[in-house]
């Protein structure tokens, strides 16, 4: 978590850094700060607890001229989110400023040593230790800031992106990376650093990813990347093929509302170019030969939060079509249970950001056990994509709201593609059936648009539910992961206690939660299990629940038991999550808005969770 920005060029550094932080605020919003090197060699630091707006207000009253700067937006780990713990952190003399994303696990040992050697600490953070270490070693290493940072990195344990500015270096920002994301933006007479490309996309679309244990020297005239021994490392740049508009609100009150509306296009992008002229799939990105695919004996899908729910949907599709056994596991639990996997296991790591620490560690563990790992991610050049054997990009475009919408939608779409591709290659579904399923998938963007266009009554319902303390979500089969997703969305956005259950399970305990008027959302599109689901609706209604049923157009089987019916168009039952998820997203956002909450930046959360 935390967003970092670095800049050296000709423009006003404060403006560039603040604009970058605005785009990275989704990564953390407990506090923010900047350090700007002025033309007369003063390293000015301003930092403030709370959202970036607090810092901007404070900065509107001061002048910070300069063309070199660094900035930070924080998700607190070490020390509460106060002014004194906000980044940048400085050394005793104020010559060095450091921003940091990650956690330095051995910071206590480092701090004890620094204090013994006379350094004074002014924050509770792990980061500050780095500023003091730079202070100690810079002169000793001949005033070479990059060499200083390299030497410090060797002593650090944990995960970090560090960006360092020094008063004596008017043309140099130094950064280092271990385990967390850092991207270089390559400009003309100016260069940029960011946690992701959105930080500098307004200035350049040429980017270069930084690899593990590499140190970057950013100057106006160019960029040098070395390993920790100081050996120069060549690397390829890439062109970012979306522009700033994709990362703007475009007239919407919240990014999430815009991102919900972008879903039809996002699905089209995920499907695009992956079908051959003969109507079958072509997924070279899997980097697996047909024989490799035929040799797979089991599939394990890992992910966190909404990505885990996409994985659950993937299980139904993969098992149905490819007849392979599929397990789905929360990435945070995966490696601690000594999983039984090996060369014939395909592990699919689902992650929008490609940086989630739990998922990354699970990927590393799976590869250590010699499984083949496929990343399903939205982020080109992300750590998970680079550390996996292959990556299937979901092409959802930037997602800024903390709550995942189009990312989940495109992850589920990608899971359907993988399921059909495995079936196609393994011959468990004949080519005509694969073509028919792909034709159904191609219709989904229009159907999702139809659902989006019908959301007026869901917003009205949200106003009625805004005062509810508890909401339950029920579904069966592929409706079950959507019940989990609906509950997660309502919890994270509206702070309403919400739980999702397989509908058949509630009589084994959770039904005790139902009181007179408890809202229960039942995901009940037309499918084979609907008769059983109707029994469950009756069971909860008999105990006083207010039943809100998501049902297929024209299906009257559930309506007698529904207090409110939300209609979706018909599609194949396995694909229904791509439609039922939309009212769940809209409902959560609208309940949060009715409660006066910040839909894009819910409390205590960050979009990219890079700590375990
Ligand atoms: O970037 P990732 O897909 O790995 O993120 C995983 C989860 O942190 C994420 O889906 C989270 O649950 C969202 N806030 C849900 O809306």
Image: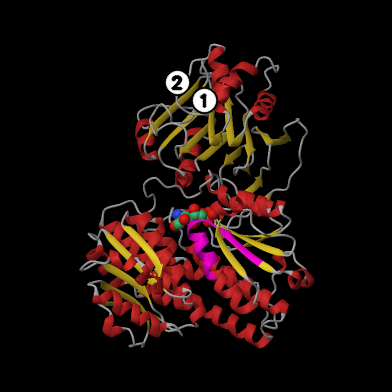
**First in residue order: circle 1 vs circle 2:** 2
Q: Residue at image x 45%, y 62%?
A: 405
Q: Residue at image x 60%, y 57%?
A: 241
One can see residue 9 in this view: no
Residue 591 in percent (x, y) is at 29, 60
Quadrant of the image occupied by residue 5: top right
Query: Which of these two is toward me, 485 or 131?
Result: 485
Q: Which residues are magenta?
A: 299-313
Residue 332 in percent (x, y) is at 54, 51
| Residue 71 inside the magenta-drawn segment | no
Crowd band around label 1 with a 10 angstrom C-alpha radius: few (<14), some (14–19), many (20+):
many
Query: Which of these two is toward me, 147 or 187?
Result: 147
Q: Eyeballing the image, is 122 above or below 212?
A: above
Residue denoted by label 2: 122
List the single residue furthest toward the front. 508
**Residue 419 circle label:** none
Residue denoted by label 1: 128
- Using residue 588 as the reference point, say whether residue 609 is left or right of it: right
Residue 347 in percent (x, y) is at 65, 61
Q: Eyeballing the image, is 584 above or below 352?
A: below
- Using residue 174 as the reference point, say whether residue 230 is left or right of it: right
Whether pointer 1 and pointer 2 mark residues with C-beta atoms closer than 8 Å, the reply is yes
Query: Which of these two is toward me, 188 or 602?
Result: 602
Residue 34 in percent (x, y) is at 47, 31
* Magenta segment main secondary structure: helix
Query: Which of these two is toward me, 501 or 188?
Result: 501
List the single residue furthest toward the top. 118
């Amino acid at each position: 978590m935390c967003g970092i920005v670095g800049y050296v060029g000709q423009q006003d550094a404060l403006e560039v850094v603040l604009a970058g932080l605005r785009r990275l605020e989704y990564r953390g919003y407990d506090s923010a700060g900047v350090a700007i090197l002025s033309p007369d060699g003063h390293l000015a630091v301003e930092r403030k607890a709370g959202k970036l707006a607090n810092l901007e207000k404070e900065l509107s009253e001061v002048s910070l001229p300069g063309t070199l700067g660094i900035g930070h937006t924080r998700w607190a780990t070490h020390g509460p989110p106060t002014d004194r713990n906000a980044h940048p952190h400085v050394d005793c003399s104020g010559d060095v400023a450091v921003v940091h994303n990650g956690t330095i696990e051995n910071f206590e040992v480092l701090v004890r040593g620094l204090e013994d050697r006379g350094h004074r600490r002014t924050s509770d953070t792990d980061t500050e230790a780095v500023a003091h270490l730079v202070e100690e070693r810079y002169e000793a290493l001949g005033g070479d800031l990059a060499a200083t940072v390299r030497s410090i990195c060797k002593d650090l344990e944990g995960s970090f992106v560090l960006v360092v500015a020094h008063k004596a270096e008017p043309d140099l920002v130094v950064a280092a990376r271990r385990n967390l994301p850092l991207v270089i933006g390559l400009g003309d007479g100016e260069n940029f650093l960011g946690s992701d490309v959105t930080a500098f996309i307004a200035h350049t679309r040429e980017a270069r990813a930084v690899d593990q244990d590499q140190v970057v020297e950013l100057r106006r005239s160019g960029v040098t990347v070395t390993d920790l021994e100081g050996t120069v490392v060549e690397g390829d740049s890439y062109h970012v093929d979306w522009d700033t508009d994709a990362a703007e609100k475009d007239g919407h009150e919240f990014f999430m509302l815009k991102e919900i509306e972008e879903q039809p296009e996002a699905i089209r992008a995920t499907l695009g170019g992956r079908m051959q002229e003969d109507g079958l799939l072509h997924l070279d990105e899997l980097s697996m030969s047909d024989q490799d695919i035929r040799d797979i004996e089991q599939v394990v899908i890992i992910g966190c939060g909404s990505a885990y729910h996409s994985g659950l949907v993937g299980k139904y599709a993969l098992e149905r079509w490819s007849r392979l056994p599929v397990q789905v596991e929360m990435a945070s639990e995966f490696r601690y249970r000594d999983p039984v996997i090996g060369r014939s296991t395909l592990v699919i790591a689902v992650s929008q950001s490609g940086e989630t620490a739990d998922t990354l560690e699970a990927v590393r563990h799976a590869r250590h056990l010699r499984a083949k790992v496929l990343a399903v991610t939205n982020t080109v050049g992300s750590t998970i994509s680079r550390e996996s054997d292959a990556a299937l990009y979901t092409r959802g475009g930037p997602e800024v709201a903390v709550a995942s919408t189009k990312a989940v939608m495109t992850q589920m779409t990608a899971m359907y593609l993988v399921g059909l591709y495995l079936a196609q290659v393994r011959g468990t579904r004949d080519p005509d059936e694969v073509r028919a399923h792909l034709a159904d998938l191609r219709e989904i963007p229009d159907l999702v648009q139809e659902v989006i266009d019908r959301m007026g009554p869901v917003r009205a319902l949200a106003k009625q539910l805004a005062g509810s303390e508890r909401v339950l979500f029920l579904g069966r089969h592929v409706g079950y992961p959507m019940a989990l997703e609906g509950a997660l969305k309502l919890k994270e956005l509206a702070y309403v206690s919400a739980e999702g259950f397989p509908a058949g399970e509630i009589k084994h305990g959770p039904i005790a939660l139902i009181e007179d008027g408890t809202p229960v959302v039942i995901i009940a599109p037309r499918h084979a299990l609907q008769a059983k689901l109707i029994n469950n609706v009756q069971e909860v209604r008999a105990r006083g629940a207010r039943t809100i049923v998501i049902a297929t157009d024209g299906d009257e089987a559930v309506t007698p038991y529904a207090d409110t019916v939300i209609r979706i168009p018909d599609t194949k039952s396995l694909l229904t999550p791509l439609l039922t998820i939309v009212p769940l997203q809209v409902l959560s956002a609208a309940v949060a808005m009715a409660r006066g909450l910040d839909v894009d930046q819910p409390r205590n959360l960050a979009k990219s969770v890079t700590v375990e």
